């Protein structure tokens, strides 16, 4: 059965953890879907791990649509969420509806994600009223990194009350889930207990209803920086480099192709 917003809500009620991972192309989506992932997030993090930007800010709607279309073609069961890029929804309700609607119509994804709490309540409410499922995102918001002055931990004592308000605002606006990024584990636990929608943590401790990691971080394919919260389950970057180096060596020495790989 395909994972839906109702599936995720039922999982929270049953205290069954939700697994989410980013994927940005057909092959990656096939792999994570067949591994049993619940949700594929086509994150604007593709700007850094796929496109080579220094942040997520330069990512465009066209780039997100291109990659999401590919990921959707690779999934069978998982829900696919489209990450709304910078300035695709912050410029007004009309722009938000048009861009989010375009995401669903052109890619075949199941929902969109946008950053912001109280300040995005009306946007979320408007999108949901237009028939567009929304996943919220509070705590560290990478699209606002220039405001924060870096990728610092959010939700310390002076911010705790605001983050709880943000979570409640996202829920009240009609979002089906909310990502909690880089906040203290105790605060994430408290938020998870006070909202009825699933919380998906990334650097937010073990008490969230689910967890999300970036594909390239999880597999050890991105070395530009290593977030504390990103556990590596493999070192595929190293293995890929070694495999390609072996190929280069065999080509140079005339070892490949051999009889087995020739017609």
Image (cartoon, grey):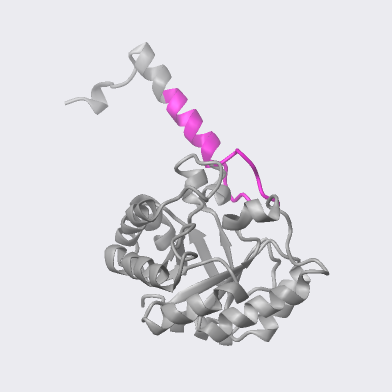
Q: Nearer the viewer, residue 66 or 32?
A: 66
Lateral position of residue 180 relative to residue 35, left or right = right
The residue depicted at 53 percent of the width and 42 percent of the height is: 221
Q: Residue 10, how many percent across, how many down?
A: 51, 85
* 241 relative to 206, above or below: above
Q: Which residues are magenta?
A: 222-246
Task: Name the outermost residue toward the left.
Answer: 263
The residue depicted at 68 percent of the width and 85 percent of the height is: 194
Q: Quadrant of residue 118?
A: bottom right
Q: Residue 89, how many percent across, how many down?
A: 46, 66
Q: Residue 257, how many percent across, how many down?
A: 28, 22
Lateral position of residue 131 relative to residue 167, left or right = left
Q: Is residue 36 visible?
A: no
* 138 relative to 152, above or below: below
Q: Nearer the viewer, residue 157 or 206?
A: 157
Task: Name the outermost residue toward the top.
Answer: 253
Q: Nearer the viewer, residue 173 or 192?
A: 173
The residue depicted at 36 percent of the width and 53 percent of the height is: 67
Residue 82 drawn in magenta: no
Q: Quadrant of residue 148?
A: bottom right
Q: Is residue 255 visible?
A: yes
**Quarter containing the N terminus:** bottom left
**Quarter containing the C terminus:** top left
Lateral position of residue 63 relative to residue 175, left or right = left
Number of on-image labels: 0
Residue 241 drawn in magenta: yes
Q: Nearer the viewer, residue 236 or 72?
A: 72
Task: Name the outermost residue toward the right.
Answer: 157
């Amino acid at each position: 059965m395909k994972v839906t917003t109702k599936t995720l809500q039922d999982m929270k009620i049953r205290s069954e953890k939700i697994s989410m991972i980013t994927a940005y192309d057909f092959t990656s989506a096939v792999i994570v879907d067949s591994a049993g992932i619940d949700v594929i997030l086509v994150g604007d993090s593709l700007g850094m791990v796929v496109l080579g930007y220094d942040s997520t800010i330069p990512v465009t709607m066209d780039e997100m649509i291109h990659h999401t279309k590919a990921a959707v073609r690779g999934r069978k069961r998982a829900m696919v969420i489209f990450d709304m890029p910078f300035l695709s929804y912050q410029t007004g309700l009309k722009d938000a509806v048009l861009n989010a609607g375009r995401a669903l119509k052109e890619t075949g994804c199941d929902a969109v994600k946008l950053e912001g709490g109280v300040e995005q309540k009306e946007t979320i409410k408007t999108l949901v009223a237009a028939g567009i499922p929304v996943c919220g995102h509070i705590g560290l918001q990478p699209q606002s990194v220039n405001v924060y002055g870096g990728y610092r931990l959010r939700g310390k004592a002076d911010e705790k009350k605001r983050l709880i308000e943000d979570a409640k605002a996202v829920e009240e606006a009609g979002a089906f889930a909310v990502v909690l990024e880089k906040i203290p584990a105790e605060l994430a636990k408290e938020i998870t207990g006070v909202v009825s929608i699933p919380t998906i943590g990334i650097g937010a401790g073990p008490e969230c209803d689910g967890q999300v990691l970036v594909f390239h971080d999880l597999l050890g394919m991105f070395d530009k920086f290593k977030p504390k919260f990103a556990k590596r389950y493999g070192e595929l970057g190293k293995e890929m480099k070694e495999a390609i180096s072996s190929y280069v060596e065999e080509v140079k020495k005339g070892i490949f192709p051999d009889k087995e790989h020739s017609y």
